[in-house]
Image: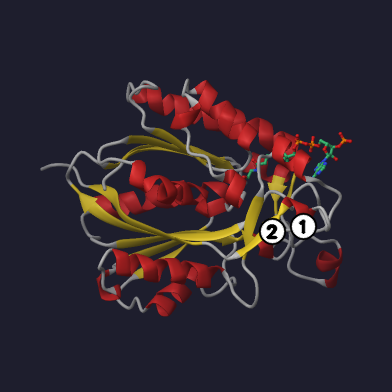
Amino acid sequence: MSKIRAAITGIEVFLPEYRLTNRELSTMVDTNDEWIMQRIGIKERRILKGDLATSDMMAAAAKKLLESTHTSPDEIDFVIAATNTPDMWLPSTACIVCDKAGIRNAWGFDLLAACSSFIFALETVNKFVESGQYKKVLLLAGDKMSSIVDYTDRNTCPLFGDAATALLIEPTTEDVGVMDHNLHADGAGAPYLNLKAGGSKLPASYETVNNRLHYVQQDGKTVFKYAVSNMADVAVEMMERHSITPDDLAYLVPHQANLRIIDAVGRRMGLPPEKVMINIEKYGNTTSATIPLCLYEWKDKLKKGDKLILAAFGGGFTWGSLYLKWAL
Ligand code: UT7
């Protein structure tokens, strides 16, 4: 019997309308467009305004996806919401999105793995689909990073933006879909990138609020160093494992945290710049959404069977690469 793999058979995105430009940021903290463009490569990022949450973005993307793939909400049998900014601790954002999108026959949960959330979730879905029991899976990936970013901290506030994506994943026995993975999690990285308060270790108190501990914090230089070496190592390893040359590979689809990190990884893989998907300038680091946002924007250029390597690095530390053959 041929092997069952998970294939992406539909993809939609939701981008908030509001654009926070470098010019506006420079009125909020001591920064400027030149520094941000040179050190990070971001021009603007989208911000979700008003009384809206991650589930609203995900539900909007999910509804578009159901429509564009002609899928009834009743057909969805499993849902994963990859996010670091759930609407609340309980219930899961997956539950809330199911309700908002009219999905009644599925079960599911949230998956939190910082900037690696999407690739961790895609491999998790792959394993469920491989079992043969799941036929139409909804993979949601998105974050309202503006809800955990400190807009008085110039070290972090230029980096992040808000967005959500929704993907339909179905089984295939063709030679496409998720081919292989190389994923890692190492809590020794915890001191360098974290959000300290609001969990069981440091529940919310006046003190945690006064000390601004409900915002994401990082030691940027250390994270940068590990991001470049770990992302490049797993991406190169994936090429070697499958004897993929730079000519064979259609694209590297990297997590979008910093243009300098992306360029360094592409160079280590021996890729020309046109084989690296980059849209960080328009959206910044949307955490769980960066990789599917790239896939969405490049989908018209992709052909069935195109070889892609997805690579990410983030808090945890978590990192890894996935080898995917495009199925659409
Ligand atoms: O996706 C999750 C993983 N996260 C990442 O991958 C992020 C990894 N880290 C980075 O991308 C970079 O480390 C940053 C973009 C966060 C910072 O860039 P850097 O080149 O590492 O800068 P730095 O922190 O070493 O700061 C260099 C200088 C400092 O000034 P002095 O001490 O040299 O006078 C900072 O105070 O730049 C200053 N600086 C800024 N200047 C203008 C820091 N932030 C800013 C800013 N505008 N926004």
Q: Residues within 10 Å of mark 1 (few under 14, many from 20)?
A: some
Q: Residue at x 32, y 78 (%)?
A: 104
**Helix, strand or loop status at disc 2:** strand
Q: Amino acid at mark 2?
A: Leu
Please tell me the numbered disc located at residue 180.
none
Q: In 3D space, how far apart are the residues under numbered discs 1 and 2 (Cα atoms)?
A: 6 Å
Q: Is residue 211 visible?
A: yes
Residue under pointer 2? 20
Report which quarter residue 239 is drawn in: top left
Report which quarter residue 1 is drawn in: top left
Q: Amino acid at mark 1?
A: Glu
Q: Residue at x 47, y 67 (%)?
A: 58
Q: Residues within 10 Å of mark 2 (few under 14, many from 20)?
A: some
Report which quarter residue 326 is drawn in: top left
Question: Would residue 63 be found to the left or right of residue 256 on screen?
Answer: left
**Helix, strand or loop status at disc 1:** helix
Along the viewing direction, whichever of 186 and 321 lies nearer the viewer: 321
Q: Residue furthest left?
A: 1
Residue 59 percent location from the top left of the image: 45, 71
Question: For disc 1, does the CB lie below 8 Å from ligand 1?
Answer: no
In which of the image's four quarters is ligand 1 placed?
Answer: top right
Report the label total. 2
Along the viewing direction, whichever of 281 and 188 lies nearer the viewer: 281
Look at the numbered discs 1 and 2 and tell me whether their residues touch, using CB distance below 8 Å.
Answer: yes
Please tell me the numbered disc located at residue 24.
1
Question: Would residue 158 be found to the left or right of residue 267 on screen?
Answer: right
Residue 176 percent location from the top left of the image: 24, 41
